[in-house]
Amino acid sequence: MAEGAVLLHGFFRDIETELIADLRAIVKAAPFRHMVTPGGHMMSVAMTNCGSKGWVTDQGGYRYDAIDPDSGRPWPAMPASFRDLAARAAEQSGFHHFAPQACLINRYRPRAKMSLHQDRDELDLGAPIVSVSLGLPATFLFGGLARNDKTQKFRLEHGDIAVWGGPARLAYHGIAPLADGEHPVMGPQRINLTFRKVQ
Ligand code: SIN
Ligand code: FE2
């Protein structure tokens, strides 16, 4: 996609069944919820997390927290299927020994979107972001290091993984409003797994 940014197509086919079963178990333990931005807006994307840290936003700001604020318990552990997939995708993209603590899980129903933003709440900017797509296709907007830089558009489909790090680590990115549809495996939604090394 750019220097330091790679798009891998059809990457998780070999472990799809395990990945989806593990995803279902996480969502059962820590259901999707619509979080509120520091500015007071409810996000159209519903979120949950797994791993030793989870990304949360509320009126107080953005942060990583070991505790799910809805349940008061730690986030579900990151399954081996998730961890191994993320490490394999990073390795394939030239980022070795990727060991994320956090996996943010985003659920997009039709019309949900994510505005252009940088992932910059992590202390370790040496590690890449690994972002796995399941379900309905989406348009990924991938820009530069400044908000106003021109964005390129990439189609993200079930099985695709985007990896960005190094010179692209702080690239602006977002998701255009999801189109209606029904995915044969995932139904009328898109799920995104975003792996981050937080510290
Ligand atoms: C994100 O930037 O957190 C989500 C990207 C995506 O849904 O593909
Ligand atoms: Fe992001």
Image: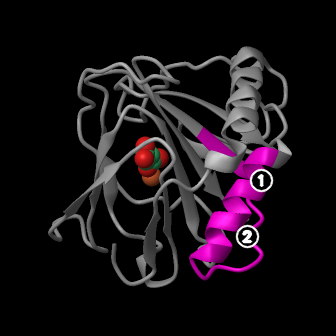
User: The residue tagged with tag 2: helix, strand or loop?
Assistant: loop
Residue, disc 2: 98
Q: Quadrant of residue 130?
A: bottom right
199 in the magenta segment: no
Residue at 72 percent of width and 80 percent of height:
96
Tell me: 20 left or right of 2: right
Q: Is residue 41 above or below residue 145?
A: above
Question: Who comes first in sequence, dot 2 or dot 1?
Answer: 1
Position of 38 with respect to 85 (left or right) is left
**Rendered position, 1 above or below 22:** below
Q: Quadrant of residue 17?
A: top right
Percent from the top left, x then y, of residue 113?
30, 34
Density class for disc 1 (Cα within 10 Å; few <14, some 14-19, many ≥20) is some
Question: Is residue 82 magenta-colored?
Answer: yes
Residue identified by numbered label 1? 83
Question: Which residue is at 77% across, 75% downward?
Answer: 97
> Does 167 appear above or below 184?
below
Bounds of the magenta span? 81-104
Task: Name the amino acid type tagged 2.
Answer: Phe
Which image quadrant is residue 4 in? bottom left
Which residue is drawn at the image coordinates 38% and 22% (left, top)? 42
Horizontal and vertical percent for residue 80? 84, 47
Q: Locate the N terminus and report the quarter of the image it occupies.
A: bottom left
Q: Tell me if I can see residue 116 in this picture.
A: no
